[in-house]
Image (cartoon, rainbow, N blue to C red):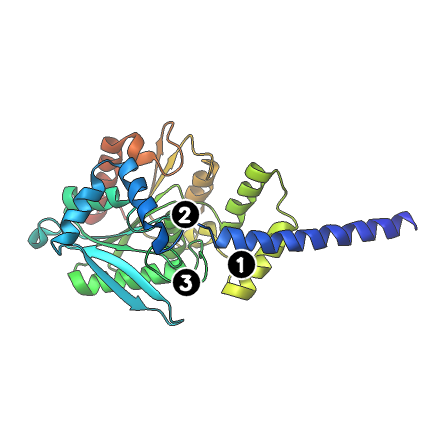
Amino acid sequence: MTLKHFAIILLAANCLTGCIAGKFMSNTALKPANHGEADIERTRHKADSLAPGVIAWYDDLHAKGIFKDMNRVDPDGHKLHAVYAPAKDPENAQGTAVIVHGYTDNHLVFMYLVRMYRDEFNYNVMVPDLQYFGYSEGEAAQMGWLDRLDVEDWAAIAHDIFKNDFTVVHGVSMGAATAMMMSGDDLPPYIRAFVEDCGYTSAWDQFAHNLKDSYHLPAFPILNSASIVSRRRYGWGFKEASSVEQLAKCDRPMLFIHGTADDFVPVDHVFENYNAKTKGYKELYLVQDAVHANSYAKDPENYTWRVKYFLQRVKDGTIK
């Protein structure tokens, strides 16, 4: 056997191994064990660990019928779920907030943001479960890419319910990526602003980081194979699911938030996302020593003030 033949065999073996690993990764990354109705109790505890008492607040308002459940069916036949509620003082509502959860989470986890918007900002709120999570059906996590279309539909439903022409989309982690990916679409005028908290630059970049950080493995050929599997099964590839590409088309105000101690979605992602947005107003808020999706818990008073001040200026036309 010549050296050339040996190299070809080695390359073929590596590619085959990569394809198998890629298929495995697609199954595990896009179908995490923590999901669905069976995961509700875990996420209730997680929500209370982030903001003690928030689940009791939600349960009380839900029992009184102030928070209502809504189910709809998407074009693929999946049942999608959300909860919604009017502002604390409905007659003087300041706008509508669509709050989008992260990977392996659901509508309950970031209920502290829902409470912030409803009780402190006097906003109507719409809080969806993304596909595959919470009470929503779906074949797999969509990492924000196809989720953005569902969130656009939920925003339209909220607009029909509340008849309010100021909507902000606020997402955390995968929900933040959803908001950024959504921001580059052709959107109705009532969607006025975005807040993204610790979102990634693309599904590809996030999975590459996870492979390197957790398994000390390179992106090639595992991610290439996994992306092909995702495209065949779910209709989208990892590089296509890009916050950066969509932000380049975004012309509406956006507040970028990231914790400096985030090692799950490294803080470098926020700088790349921030620099990708070249149209319209943008603002960067770094929370010192906050780990992933923990910026509010680290500094709730300043977090609340920064978001409120950002939205006030968008509403009054100071920033566009």
Q: Earlier in the sequence, mark 3 or mark 2?
A: 3
Which amino acid type is shown beneath numbered disc 1? Gly
Compared to 140, does 291 lie above or below?
A: above
Judge depth for marks 3 and 1 and give the one in front: 3
Residue under pointer 1:
237
Secondary structure, mark 3, is loop
Compared to 176, does 260 lie above or below?
A: above
Residue under pointer 2:
277
Which amino acid type is shown beneath numbered disc 2? Lys
Residue under pointer 3:
138
* Alpha carbon separation for disc pair 3 and 1: 17 Å
Left of 281 or right of it: where is 142? right
Q: x, y (%) of residue 144?
A: 42, 54
Which amino acid type is shown beneath numbered disc 3? Gly
Dot 2 surroundings within 10 Å: few (below 14), some, or many (20 or more)?
many
In the rendered picture of this protein, how many numbered marks are placed on residues?
3
Q: At x 65% / y 48%, what residue is drawn?
A: 220
Q: At x 53% / y 46%, what residue is drawn?
A: 207
Judge depth for marks 2 and 1 and give the one in front: 1
* Alpha carbon separation for disc pair 3 and 2: 31 Å
- Can I make out residue 94 in this image? no
Question: Disc number at residue 62?
Answer: none
Front position in the image: 57 or 202: 57
* Alpha carbon separation for disc pair 2 and 1: 22 Å
On the image, which quarter does residue 48 sit in? top left
